Image (cartoon, grey):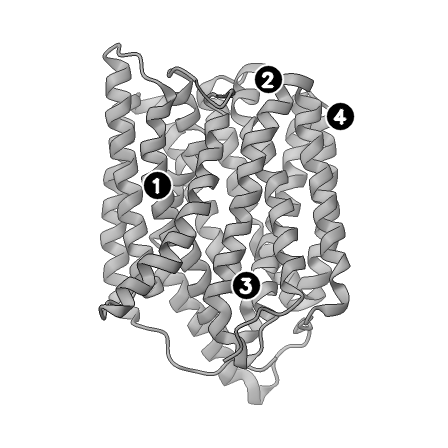
Amino acid sequence: MPSRLPRQVPFIVTTEACERFSYYGMLSVLTLYLKNDLALGADDAKSAVHVFKMAVYFLPLAGAWVADRWLGPYRTILSLALFYCVGHGALALFEGSRAGVFTGLALIALGAGGIKPCVSAFVGDQFDAAQQGLLPKVYGLFYWAINLGALFGFALIPLIRDHFGFAWAFGIPGLFMALATLVFRAGARFYVKPPPARRAPAPAEASAEGDRWRVVGRVALVLLPVPVFWALFDQINSSWVLQGERMTPFEVLGYRVDAERIQSVSALLVLLWVPILTLGVYPWCERRGIRATPLRRMGAGMVFGSLSFVICAWLQRRIETGETLSLAWQVAPYTVLELGEVLLSASGLEFAYARAPGSLKSTVMSLWLLTTAAGNFLVAVITALNARFVHATGTAEFLFYAGVMLVAAGAFAVIARRIGPAPATSREAR
C-alpha cells in the first residue's frame, strides 16, 4: 500500500490553513465587537454570532449542489472565494456600520459555506483506489491544518485589533483569504478534478441512483444527534467569551491572555490531541483488540463535550458566589472539550467521506457540515427563548446543555449500533 501522500495535497492543506486563519481570526473579535462597539448587548450579540455560524454551515448544501451538478468542486471553490474576500473587505471598510457589518458577514457566510464541503471532498478525491488506506492520515492532517490556522487567527487578530483597530483586524483575514485562493490556484495542474454530474441518470441507472441516495439517508441518520455537540462546542465563541469577561486575564511570556485571546487555546489543544490520539491512543487500542472505529470515537467525543460543560458550570458557580478566578481556569474545560472535538470531528469527516457514494461526495460532506448549522440554530433559538421566558443564566444554563448532550450521546449510541460498520466495498468509479 502506498505510504506517501499525493503531491497536490499540500496545496489543498495550505489553502485550508489560510482560509481558517481568515475565518477564525475574524470570529475571534466578533462577539465583543457586536456586543460593545455595535451596542447589541450580550444576548443579541450571542444570537447574531450563532445565526451567522448557522448560515456558514447551512450554505454547504448549496455549494455541494453546485459542485456535484454544475461546476465541479474545483471551479466552485475558486468562484465562491471571491465572495469570501469581498465580505472581509466590507467588514474592514464599513467598521461601525451595522448594515455594512451584516452585509460582510452574509458574503463571508456565502463564500465559506459554499467552499467548505467542496474542499473537504476535494482532498479525498486526490486519492485513487490503491491509496484509500491513507484517508485517515490525510483527514487527520487536514484537520490539523484547520486548527493551525485557527490557532494563529485567535492569537493574533485580537492583538492586531488592540494596536491598529477593527479595520485592520477584519482586513488582514481578508488578505489571508486572498492568499488561500492563490495557493489553491497554484496547484491546479496537479489536481484530480472530478466532473459534475450534469445529466439526469438514465433509466438503467435509476436503481443505482436510488441505492446511492439510500446510503446518503443512512449517513444523515447517524449524524442526527451530532448538532447537539456543536451547540455546545460553538459556544466557546460566545458563552465562554462572556464567562471569560468575568475572570481575570493572565500572561504567558508577556502575552496577555484575555477572554478573546484564550480562544486560541482551542486550536492549540487540537494540534496536541490529534497526534496523541492518532499516534498513541488509537494504535494502543488496536494492539489490545479494541477497535477505535469512527462511530465509537464520535460517541466518546459527545461524552467529553458534556463533561466540559459540567466543568464550566462549576467555574460559573464559583464566579457567582463572588470568587475571583483567573482566566487560566478555563483551560480545564477547553482541554476536555477539544478532546471531544477531535474524537468527533476528525472521525466524522472520515466517516462521511468513506460512506459517501462517489457521485455525491460533496453532498454528503455538506450533510456533515449541516450538523454545525443545526447546532448553532439550536443555540440561537434556546438563547432567545431563555431570554424571553425562562431567564436561566450561568450555572443552570451550562448544566442544561451538559444534560442535553448526554441524552444525544445515548441516542447516537443506539443509532450507531443499528447502522453497523462500513461495508468493505471498493471506491465508486467517477
Residue type indicated by callout 4: Leu
Q: Earlier in the sequence, mark 1 or mark 2?
A: 2
**Label 2 crowd bin: few (<14), some (14–19), many (20+), radius 10 Å:** some
Give the residue drawn at x 33%, y 56%: 298
Q: Earlier in the sequence, mark 3 or mark 2?
A: 2
Alpha carbon separation for disc pair 3 and 1: 28 Å
Give the residue drawn at x 26%, y 14%: 320
Q: Would residue 430 be visible to someone looking at this image?
A: yes
Q: Tell me the SS state at disc 4.
A: helix
Residue type indicated by callout 1: Leu
The label on residue 93 is: 4
Q: Is residue 395 left or right of residue 277?
A: left
Alpha carbon separation for disc pair 2 and 4: 15 Å
Residue marked by disc 1:
337
Res 76 quadrant in image:
bottom right
Task: Return the residue nearer the eye: 101 or 331.
Answer: 331
Q: Position of residue 244 (x, y in %)?
A: 40, 21
Task: Return the residue nearer the eye: 119 or 156.
Answer: 156
Residue marked by disc 2:
38
Q: Tell me the SS state at disc 2.
A: loop
Residue type indicated by callout 2: Leu
